[in-house]
Amino acid sequence: MIKFGPSGNCEAFYAAGYKHTEQSAEFCKNLNLSCFEYSFGRGVKMTKSKALSIGDAFKKAGVEISVHAPYFINFANPDDEAAAKSYGYVLDSAEYLSLFGGERVVFHPAAQGKVSREEAVKKAEDRLKILRDLIYEKGFQNLKFCPETMGKIAQIGTLEEVVRFCKIDSCFVPAIDFGHINAREQGSLKTEEDYQSRLEYMIAELGYDRVKNFHVHFSKIMYGGRGEIKHLTFEDKQYGPEFAPLAVALKKLKLEPYIVSESAGTQAEDACEMMRIYNSVDIQN
């Protein structure tokens, strides 16, 4: 079943007097949203008792929770010791995700650095194979580990690169940030076909079953010559992408992803708008 929800807490959450992540569960439920993404972007810094408390709140509300691993992960780091820390960031995120009762860990794959693109991608690929082995050793293979498409040109994470990483093992599921794709490709996502061609590419490469419930990040993003600059809200009329053509493509292909709004401050409202748009789409068979 398709799910919609916010990444973190929106401005309205705090304006209503809420403070704690446990309250995010009821906040989402009251908006008829069905998922929520918690960010460990600046590091996994939480007590296990707090994680269990958050997990209990989301279980009671019937809202699924995912996590975003720390932003400083780089599986293409030329320094082996520095790169080794990335395994820990992902696995620590997975441990706390398990305490939350969720099943999806999103992570940024790598940065190109000063080497060639292919060299960086290959290094990241090799290290993700090591990560795969560690995932099985830790017993986390029942979770979904989601390498994300990235918005800056210098970052590793084109659609093709993410699909390549997901071919390593079934524990890897693509996290497709359509705002990032649009930003790095200078406004490439405009029509239903623009979305459908990319979805069909994933299905052809990974199979329908692997792609059916893939992970999605969606927001409008300002971009320049080097790609992503900053996240915007759905109120912005200058930059894309628009969600409506994606909603049509998803319904046509019978895909039911986990869709997270990463709008700047209006995450919950824009998640609700995506849900409204999706539910308004009528595909005639």
Image (cartoon, rainbow, N blue to C red):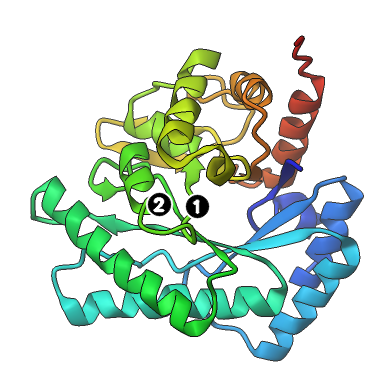
Mark yes or no: residue 212 visible. Answer: yes
> Looking at numbered disc 2 in the image, what kind of residue is underneath it?
Cys
Tell me the distance, in whole angstroms, between the alpha carbons under discs 1 and 2: 6 Å
In this view, the residue in front, 187 or 199, is 199
Q: Position of residue 210 (x, y in %)?
A: 54, 46
In this view, the residue in front, 96 or 284, is 284
In this view, the residue in front, 240 or 198, is 198
Q: Is residue 72 above or below residue 11?
A: below
Q: Position of residue 258 (x, y in %)?
A: 65, 46
* Residue position marked by numbered label 2 in the rendering: 166
Image quadrant assignment for residue 284: top right
Say if mark 1 contacts mark 2, CB within 8 Å.
Answer: yes
Q: Is residue 57 above or below residue 81?
A: above
Farthest residue toward the top?
284
* Residue position marked by numbered label 1 in the rendering: 173
> Looking at numbered disc 1 in the image, what kind of residue is underneath it?
Val
Residue shown at 39%/57% (left/top)? 108
Farthest residue toward the left?
115
- The N terminus appears in which quarter of the rendering? top right
Q: Position of residue 215 (x, y in %)?
A: 57, 47
